[in-house]
Amino acid sequence: MAKKSFLTALLVVMAVLCAEAQNLNGRLADENGEPVAFANITLKMAANDSLVAGLTSDENGAFSVDVKEGKYILIASAIGYERLTVRCGATALGTLLMPKTSEQLDEVVVEGSRVTEEAGRFVVLPDPKEAEVSGRGLTLLDMQQLPGLEVDVALQKITIDGGTPILQINGKEVPIERFVNVRPEQILRIEYSNSPGIRYLDRNASGVINLVLKESDDGGNVMARIQSAFTTGFVDGYLMAAHHKGKSEFSLQYNLSHRNYKNVPYVMTDSYIAEERTVERSQELSFPFNYITHNITGEYTYQPNDSTMFVATLRDYIDNNHWYGTGTIDETENGTTIQMGMNKQSDRKGNSPTLDLFFTHKMRNKQKIELNAVGQYSHSDYYNNMIYRDSENEWQYPTKVINKGYAIGGEAVYSKQFKKVEACVGLQYQHNFASNDYVIYETQTEMTKDNTYLYTSIRGNLGGNVMCWLGTGAKLFAVTDGIDTKRYLRNLSTAGLFWSINQRWSVTVNTQFVPYLPSLSDLSPVLQRVDDVEAIRGNESLRPYNTLYGSLQLRYNNKGWFASMIPSYFRYFSPTVRVYQYDPELGLFVGTPQNTDYYQHFQLKAEVGVKQLFDRLNITLNAKLKKDEAKGEEFYHDNLNFSSGIKAQFVWKQLVVGCNFDFLPDKSLFGEVISIGEMSQSIYAEYNWKSLNASLAWHCPFNKKGYMYQTSSLSAVHPYCHTNWTSNNGNMVVLGLTWKFNYGKAFNKSQKTLWNGGYDDGMVK
């Protein structure tokens, strides 16, 4: 009897366990039976629409999840396929059909099933194994090895072809501090473009990177990160918390950055050459600096349905910077040499609150509108004082500027997707006002600028494996100094063509025509005296200049091995260059921006590498050959340079170890100035364990001088060579710790892609 009771109890327990642990599984396929790989799958309770699980189908389209007995709603989506919604129970669903959408732009698979290339962009579905070992989104992005993308994990730096890209999360532009700290497991896909398109040409962006996130868990998430070098004044902190209830979400972000570098040597030689006056200078000084910045952002999002979203963002940027340099200077004038002590002090305090309002709405027939309004106020105090002393005298050259101003702007965009073609039209406007009080000179300026930009673009499939994109825009720019107003009308245009030759080879052609307009400080008539020899001022007669860019990219990819070769050409027509001339009335050498003849450079860039070699190693080798030419009324200069470097990552379980090393630095010529870029030298390691991530970055290993910066001028009037290095960064080890905690109800943000504008203080300094 006891034995029978025991068996009965055991059967009851097994039945309860089975009821608690059912398996829901199936396979996604298109109308031809081909698997829909790496689709995003969301499982919700049918009764209350609460999130149960989020998962991804594997390379065969299969998925599986353990759930309790009950009724569910399964939602599956993938690029190029119709959205699938199924009501089901906790059971085997078999094969579920996801037809290809007829209105989706054709895609070309160029790297397995995880990378597709559309018109002007790559779409990457990250490998779950890579997301698991990456502590931050920055590390995961580095693993993708996309063409032109340069990620320095140690420096938290992201560039595309050497320029600054637009960084977005769910289509909304965010600061780099938020972007690099995204949790890798949140990332559904990465949308990457090394061509900014007509929309962002006006901002001089080198490309766009958008992280599309998965739906979050119930409640929200919290993330905190702190990193410090301990041996020197280097501290960064980041805190982000988000919570949503119903159709609303609230988030708060705070970023702190502090530097206190005491070992910053400068070595400078300057010559000032004119018939009336000739001066030779040799300077050695230490120029320590410290600063602290605060970035505070509060955001409210209201999303009543999948088609409509409103976002209100209030952010503030507060900065406090201080430099104080001491050293000696040997100055020779007309054959007489004197030695002086020198002190230079610079301080800047600023505050820039911004209110950003955004609205988007998706309509019938694949239509969408986006509206954005932004207002920013700015206030800053700038002080600079140069002091020279000899045994008997002291000379001071102070500058103090109080800036107040504001910027207001907005953008409206309408887009519609036709069969195999997507088109959009947009209008941007920004008004900027800047008031500068030059206290020492008892001079005040009030300047305004208005920037109106109307643009349109189209992209689509020409048939087969050929895709193209076209864009053009008209830019009306007006500047006034309170008396006179200048207006400029310029065109912006871009065009591109992508051809997938086969699964291994592809070709991309891209061209851009962009005007560059003068800043308020370049146009300001105020003269700022630097010392007893030099002064700088703007140029009211300055004209805009145009640039023409063209490139051809040949790319190979096969089973993890990849290579690319990109010849490109830049041409600047009448570019703005700072030119020095001697002013006999002032007795000073004055530097002013002027329009010169042209600047151009030819470049050949090559990359070769392998991804997941032995499932552990990623390696990229890069090399660049470049020739620069610059011509003005009284000068012609050219420069030939070869640069190269290596990037590598080793992945083992939860550990990532990587390095970034430049073998030869990049040396660039623009106008009459040659700049040698910093040599990237860093080794980093990250270990990811549950909610914690520990990181270590070793900057400039075995190099006590740290990062070095050098500029030299080929000017016949003011040739110079300036070299400085941040010794505090030499052989520096930075430790970091990140803590992540998640909770929450599903909240799927819509896309925000509008420009938030910016403020131009117009200050001559």
Image (cartoon, helix red, strand yellow):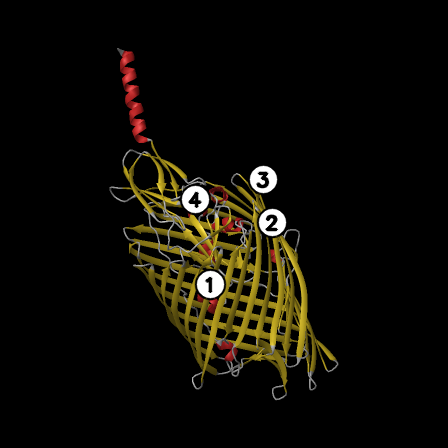
Residues at badges 1 and 4 in contact (C-beta under 8 Å)? no
Residues at badges 1 and 3 in contact (C-beta under 8 Å)? no
Give the residue pinned by disc 2.
609
Q: Earlier in the sequence, mark 2 or mark 1?
A: 1
Q: Which sits in the foreground, 329 or 535? A: 535
**Residue sitting at x 57%, y 67%:** 324
**Residue sitting at x 29%, y 27%:** 16
Q: Earlier in the sequence, mark 1 or mark 4?
A: 4
Q: CA distance from mark 1 to mark 4?
A: 27 Å
**Quadrant, the N terminus:** top left
> x, y (%) of residue 87?
28, 41
State the image quarter where residue 455 is shown. bottom left
State the image quarter where residue 577 is shown. bottom right
Q: Nearer the viewer, mark 3 or mark 4?
A: 4
Dot 4: element = loop
Residues at badges 2 and 1 in contact (C-beta under 8 Å)? no
Q: Which sits in the foreground, 300 or 344? A: 300
Q: CA distance from mark 1 to mark 3?
A: 38 Å
Dot 3: element = loop
Q: Is residue 35 visible?
A: yes
Left or right of 570 in this view: 349: left
Q: CA distance from mark 4 to mark 2?
A: 25 Å
Q: Earlier in the sequence, mark 4 or mark 2?
A: 4
Give the residue pinned by disc 4.
38
Q: Residues within 10 Å of mark 2 (few under 14, many from 20)?
A: many
> x, y (%) of residue 562?
58, 50
Q: Nearer the viewer, mark 2 or mark 1?
A: 1
The kind of residue on which mark 1 rests is Trp
Dot 2: element = strand
The kind of residue on which mark 2 rests is Gly
Give the residue pinned by disc 1.
469
Give the residue pinned by disc 3.
614
